[in-house]
Each structure stands twice: as C-alpha cells, then as structure tokens.
Image (cartoon, rainbow, N blue to C red):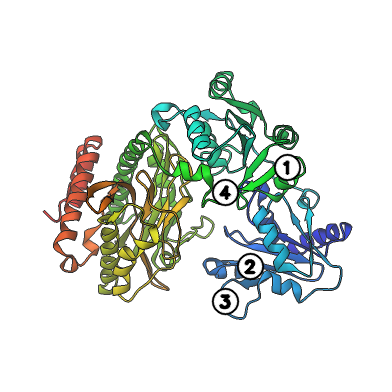
C-alpha cells in the first residue's frame, strides 16, 4: 500500500529529527528526463506525470502539480494518503504556505541536497522561514526496497563529419569568450552541455543520447567523470588527444576537491546541485556564479555550426521519408477499415524510423492524441487503456534522434469529414505557422518579439494557447534546448544565426480536439542594408501539410506562395528516396495548389 510507504518515510524522518521532506521530480543533472532510480516522487505517490513535487510531513502529505495533470493526479493519488494541490488555482496554498500552517518551534524540513540547485536552496530558505531547512541525504536508499539500479551504458564519440568542431577548438573558444585564467575551474553537471563539449554521446537517459556525466573545465583541459568501463581504449585515446582526462563518475567528490582547491570556481546556480556547492565552497579560492541564461556552455552550444546545420537538413530528410510512409499507412488503414489504436501508431512511426541506419531512438515520448485527447498539449497515451481511432481529429507529435541531428514535428489529421469549426481553427494555426516562417527581423531580436506573428493569427480566430510558440532544439542532443525561445514571456536571449528552434502555434478546444502544426526552423542571414543586418528563418522540416483541412479561401497570395514552395521542396527532397507508390502518394499531397 502507498500509505505504508509514507509510514516508512516518516519513520526515517523521525530518525533524523525532521518534521517534513520535500521530494522533487528531477535528478542531480536537472535534465528533462530521468532514470527510474530517481523517480522517488512517482514511487511514493503513484503519480506518473513529468512535473510535480511531493511534500511529506509527520502528519500530512501533498502533491503540487500544474493544470496539465490535474485529472491524472486526482486518479492516481487515490488511496495514497497524499492530497492534490493545484498550482495556479486561486485559493490553493503554495508549498511554503502549506508547511507554515503546520509550523511548531524548532521543526526542520529536509531536502536531498543532490536534487536541489544552489538557487533552489537559497529560495527555499527564504520561503520556508521560520522553518529550518536541513540538507539531507537520499532517504529513499533505506525506504525504497526494490529500487531500480542506476544504469551506465557504453559511450561513443561523435565524428567531426557529424559535429563539425573538435573539443580542443570548442574549449579554446569557451576559454577565450569567458576570460578563463589558469586559476579558473568551471564545474558543470549538465549532461548535454558536457556531451556537446566532448563530442560524446551515450544512452543512459531515455530519449536523450547522453551519458550520465559531470565535468570540471579549465583553460587547458576537461576533467570528465563518466562510466569509465563504457569507454573503449580507442575512444579513451581520442578523448585524451582532445585534452580530456577521464575519471569514474563516482569519483567526482574526491577528485573535484583536488582539482578545484585554490581555484576560482565557476558554477551555474540554477543547474548545479547544492551538494556539489557544499563540496567545493570550503576549498575554492572563490566561487562565481555563471548567470547567463542557459549557462556559458549552453549559449555556445545553441549556435550550430555549418556541419551541424547541414546535419539537421539531412536528419529532416530522413525523418520526412519516415513520415511519408507513416502518413500513407494511416490513410490506407482508414480506407481499408483497419482498426487502429493510439499506441499502435506510436509504435509504427518508431518502427519505420528504425529502418534508417542513422536512427538512434525517439527524441521524446510520441504524442498520438485522438479527438478530445488532442486538447491536452502534453497528452500521454496509454497501452493499458488504449484509445481506438474512429472518426475525428488526430494529432501526431513525434521526433527522432539521428546521428545527423534531432527532429520534432507535429501534424494534425482528420479521420472523416471535418466540421467548419475545425477547419476555421486549423486555418488559423496554419496561417500563424506560415507567418512566423516568413519572418524577417533585425539582428538582435528576441524570440518574444516574434511570438505574436504566430499567436496573432490564432487570436484573430478568438482562440489562444498557453505554451510557447518555439523551443530550441539540440543537435543529436535534447529536443528541448535553451537558452533561446519564442514565447510570450520575456527571454533576454537574442536569436542568432545558427540557432534551431520549433515553430508550433496551436489551438485546443477542451472536450473536442487539439490542432498543432509544427516545423523546425533555423535562424539564417537574410540581407544587409544601411539600417543594419537582417535575419530570417529556414524551414528544415520536410513533411507534407494536410491542406484538405484548411479553408484555402482564407489564405492570402503570399501564404499560398509559401505553401507551394514548401510542398515543392518536400517533394523534390523526399521523392528520390521513395518507391513509385510512395512518390504518387506524396505528389497527391504536395500538388493540390498547383
């Protein structure tokens, strides 16, 4: 029983003199996906959503999550002894308010210092006062008896033909741009930053081609902490040649003290665990905070070089072929009356992608959402309770990891005849996507300044969407990558030539359907004038857009022109990889405006 889990945890709290314990959803690397070993919040609550925090005290327990998961959480928390607290709902208490209602003089609240960043801890100390915040260890070592083990898989190097720049050259630029001295030591535990810097990839983390790793970067070398047994002798030699010294992942604490002693240590307070800070603070000459949005490595990583950009183009071509075969299969199944379920389509696109020798897995959990399910922007399909497709809308959001790059595409279909309401909404989303695709903007522009191009068309239809219009995308790394974004909220990071991001306006009608059309776009040079330099977007995605669902009379000449050119490029790039039947199908989907 879940309540027995609470009892066991409360016993451990008493042993340590703690009144309460805060359980987050992350691991010590603060990435989007985590190994099962770190899913303590899920284990104790039964709630499987990606975002949420559980707080357990000696007398009460509660889960905080956002509106994406209210219905799911209410169902999964039944019988757990944990009540739901809805973030963003009027009248609901914050974690701090809820705890303060239970305060008695001398009570302490514990956190696992490996799972809270330096910024988190400082913030919690202020929020929870007069509670004393206690830096604790991982209490689930004793509580979770059948806990999964941490897994460490083999690592592999990424050839220059894929990554374009050697580690030595990346390190030189990082050191030069950030004024590293011989006494500088940059500590990073952000796995994708380290993988990019060292031109390494792995498979320790689901959907992300990453090794679990930590690093200490100086002006002359990189000290890499990873699964040493997962490296071949040849790879070790190649890493050493690129000024990378390698240690076992578990040796970080002892070695970091040795390497950082007497150094000016630089850390990102938002992405560095407090446990790391507490190790380094006593022995460092000084500790400085890397306060750049996304960190100094993340900023350099976000600007793709020409080899990486060409890789994205190739990855989108490979992925486009898979999409054509996938969409054709769906259409044929509908015509033949084949019964399909959401999870079967998710499996099908993975199977088709896997036919490519460059495929390395999905870039995120596929979203296949039929009908009203599509109104949940982050819908999770279920194999245990399968949704069978009938007449209605179908939202498909899926992407692949390829040696050449990472992909992320969304297309919305309709099985049967769409309503006029649906077509009007689909047209608004399409117009918004095209508007952002065609943007020309001055160098130095931020994503928030462009967001309205896409969102404005949706507003004109009397609709809205709450998520961002665009997120950064990693190069054979994380599908969600910063520091840039295109969204309503202010982000000081400017869009630079070489940045790759999504373009995904949407409309969600609760109880009816969701519509999203998503392409990947790269920021490229446009032209120069006496007024300065101007940039634009290159659309990378090569997947046909279903125009039968749009009201073409609502599209202007420039929008029709863009669609014609886009579909012409899709056909020209993909047809050379298709058989005759697939070519005919693709031609029928890309020539409707001719």
Measure the C-alpha gap from mark 2 to mark 1: 32 Å
C-alpha gap between disc 4 and disc 2 = 19 Å
Q: Which mark is residue 31?
A: 4
Residue 280 tag number: 1
Which residue is nearer to you in this view: 349 or 236? 236
What residue did someone put label 2 on?
64
Dot placed on the residue nearer the N-terminal end, 4 or 2: 4
Q: Earlier in the sequence, mark 2 or mark 3?
A: 2
Report which quarter residue 69 is drawn in.
bottom right
Cα separation, mark 4 vs mark 1, equals: 22 Å
| Labels 4 and 1: the sequence-earlier one | 4
- Please report the residue visible at 20 percent of the width from the left and 67 percent of the height from the top: 551
* Image quadrant occupied by the N terminus: bottom right
Residue picked out by circle 3? 89
| Labels 2 and 3 touching (C-beta < 8 A) | no
- In the structure shown, which secondary structural element does the residue marked by tag 2 occupy? strand
């Amino acid at each position: 029983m879940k309540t027995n889990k609470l009892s066991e945890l409360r016993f451990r709290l008493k042993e340590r003199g703690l009144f309460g314990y805060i359980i987050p959803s992350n691991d010590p690397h603060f990435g989007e996906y985590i190994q099962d070993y770190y899913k303590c919040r899920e284990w104790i609550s039964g709630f499987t959503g990606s975002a949420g925090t559980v707080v357990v005290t000696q007398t009460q327990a509660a889960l905080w999550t956002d509106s994406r998961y209210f219905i799911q959480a209410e169902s999964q928390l039944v019988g757990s002894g944990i009540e739901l607290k809805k973030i963003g709902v009027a009248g609901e208490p914050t974690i701090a308010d809820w705890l303060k209602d239970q305060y008695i003089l001398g009570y302490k609240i514990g956190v696992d210092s490996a799972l809270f960043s330096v910024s988190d801890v400082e913030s919690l100390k202020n929020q929870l006062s007069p509670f004393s915040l206690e830096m604790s260890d991982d209490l689930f070592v004793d509580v979770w008896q059948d806990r999964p083990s941490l897994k460490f898989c083999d690592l592999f190097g990424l050839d220059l033909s894929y990554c374009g720049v050697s580690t030595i050259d990346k390190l030189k630029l990082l050191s030069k741009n950030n004024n590293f001295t011989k006494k500088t030591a940059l500590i990073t535990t952000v796995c994708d930053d380290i993988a990019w810097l060292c031109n390494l990839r792995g498979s320790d983390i689901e959907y992300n081609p990453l090794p679990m790793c930590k690093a200490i970067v100086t002006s002359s070398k990189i000290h890499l902490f990873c699964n040493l047994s997962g490296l071949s002798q040849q790879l070790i030699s190649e890493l050493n040649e690129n000024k990378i010294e390698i240690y076992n992942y578990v040796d970080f604490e002892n070695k970091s003290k040795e390497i950082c002693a007497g150094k000016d240590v630089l850390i990102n307070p938002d992405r560095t665990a407090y446990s790391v800070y507490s190790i380094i603070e006593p022995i460092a000459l000084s500790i400085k905070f890397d306060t750049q949005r996304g960190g100094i490595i993340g900023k350099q990583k976000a600007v793709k070089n020409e080899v990486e950009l060409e890789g994205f183009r190739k990855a989108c071509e490979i992925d486009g072929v898979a999409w054509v075969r996938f969409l054709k299969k769906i259409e044929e199944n509908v015509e033949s009356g084949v019964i399909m379920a959401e999870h079967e389509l998710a499996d099908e696109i993975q199977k088709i992608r896997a036919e490519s020798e460059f495929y390395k897995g999905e870039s995120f959990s596929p979203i296949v959402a039929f009908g009203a399910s599509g109104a949940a922007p982050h819908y999770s399909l279920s194999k245990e309770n399968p949704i069978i497709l009938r007449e209605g809308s179908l939202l498909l959001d899926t992407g692949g990891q390829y040696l050449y790059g990472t992909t992320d595409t969304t297309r919305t279909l309709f099985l049967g005849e769409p309503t006029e309401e649906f077509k009007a909404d689909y047209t608004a989303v399409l117009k918004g996507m095209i508007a952002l695709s065609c943007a020309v903007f001055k160098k130095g522009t931020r994503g928030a300044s462009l967001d309205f191009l896409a969102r404005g068309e949706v507003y004109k239809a009397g609709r809205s969407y709450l998520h961002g219009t665009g997120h950064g995308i990693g190069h054979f790394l994380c599908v969600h990558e910063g520091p840039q974004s295109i969204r309503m909220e202010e982000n000081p990071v400017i869009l630079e030539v070489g940045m790759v991001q999504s373009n995904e306006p949407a409309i969600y009608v609760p109880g009816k359907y969701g519509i999203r059309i998503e392409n990947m776009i790269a920021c490229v040079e446009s032209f120069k004038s006496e007024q300065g330099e101007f940039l634009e977007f290159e659309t990378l995605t090569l997947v046909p857009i279903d125009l039968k669902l749009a009201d073409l009379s609502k599209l202007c000449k420039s929008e029709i022109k863009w669609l014609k050119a886009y579909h012409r490029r899709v056909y020209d790039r993909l047809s050379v990889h298709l058989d005759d039947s697939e070519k005919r199908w693709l031609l029928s989907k890309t020539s409707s405006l001719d």
